[in-house]
């Protein structure tokens, strides 16, 4: 079992930045692909970014490419989402996810999920 706890959400103006953090505990963190998803009001949850266990590969949704970066610190059991040039359409609850299989995480069928952190971007 892996427990995931997100933090770092908040209210910022358009054009600003936020850094989300996800703390993992429980089973060995290092073997898991990690991902970030988001869900806006009235919309389905959507993929944002993912990173392999060794940070060799990162992958982003087209909507955030060039603005968001994902990173991890396996020594600290942490994964981060740096969000720059934020837009009102980035407003959503952001979820951290973990899974053994890259494809499953990117597809949104990760093994473990956090509770989410609210990100609100004002125009």
Image (spheres, helix red, strand yellow):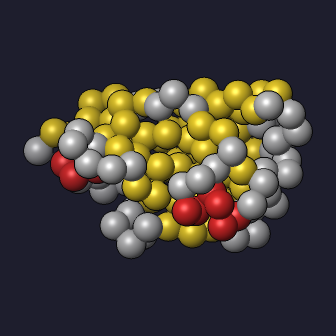
Along the line of sight, which residue is nearer the eye, 31 or 110? 110
Asked if residue 15 shows in the view, the reply is: no
Q: In which quarter of the image is the C terminus?
A: top left
Write down the quadrant of residue 54 in the picture: bottom right
Residue at the spot x=28%, y=43% of the render?
Answer: 40
**Residue placed furthest toward the left:** 123
Residue at the spot x=58%, y=62% of the render?
Answer: 106
Along the line of sight, which residue is nearer the eye, 31 or 108? 108
**In this rendering, is residue 80 above or below 49?**
above
Residue at the spot x=65%, y=60% of the render?
Answer: 104
**In this rendering, is residue 121 above or below 32?**
above
Write down the quadrant of residue 108 in the picture: bottom right
Asked if residue 31 shows in the view, the reply is: yes
The percent coordinates of residue 115 (x first, y second) are 51, 28
The percent coordinates of residue 46 (x first, y second) are 40, 55
How many numbered marks does the figure carry? 0
**In this rendering, is residue 35 above or below 120?**
below
In the picture, measured across the screen, residue 119 lies left or right of residue 26, that is left
Residue at the spot x=88%, y=39% of the render?
Answer: 28
The percent coordinates of residue 64 (x first, y second) are 38, 63
Write down the quadrant of residue 50 in the picture: bottom right
The percent coordinates of residue 100 (x first, y second) are 78, 54
């Amino acid at each position: 079992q892996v427990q995931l706890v997100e933090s770092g959400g908040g209210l910022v103006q358009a054009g600003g930045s936020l850094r989300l953090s996800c703390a993992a505990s429980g089973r060995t963190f290092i073997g898991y692909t990690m991902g970030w998803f988001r869900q806006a009001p009235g919309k389905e949850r959507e993929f944002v970014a993912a990173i392999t266990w060794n940070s060799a590969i990162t992958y982003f949704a087209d909507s955030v490419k060039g603005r968001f970066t994902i990173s991890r610190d396996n020594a600290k059991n942490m994964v981060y989402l740096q969000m720059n040039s934020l837009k009102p359409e980035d407003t959503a609850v952001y979820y951290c996810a973990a899974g053994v299989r890259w494809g499953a995480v990117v597809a949104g069928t990760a093994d473990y999920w956090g509770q989410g952190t609210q990100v609100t971007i004002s125009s």
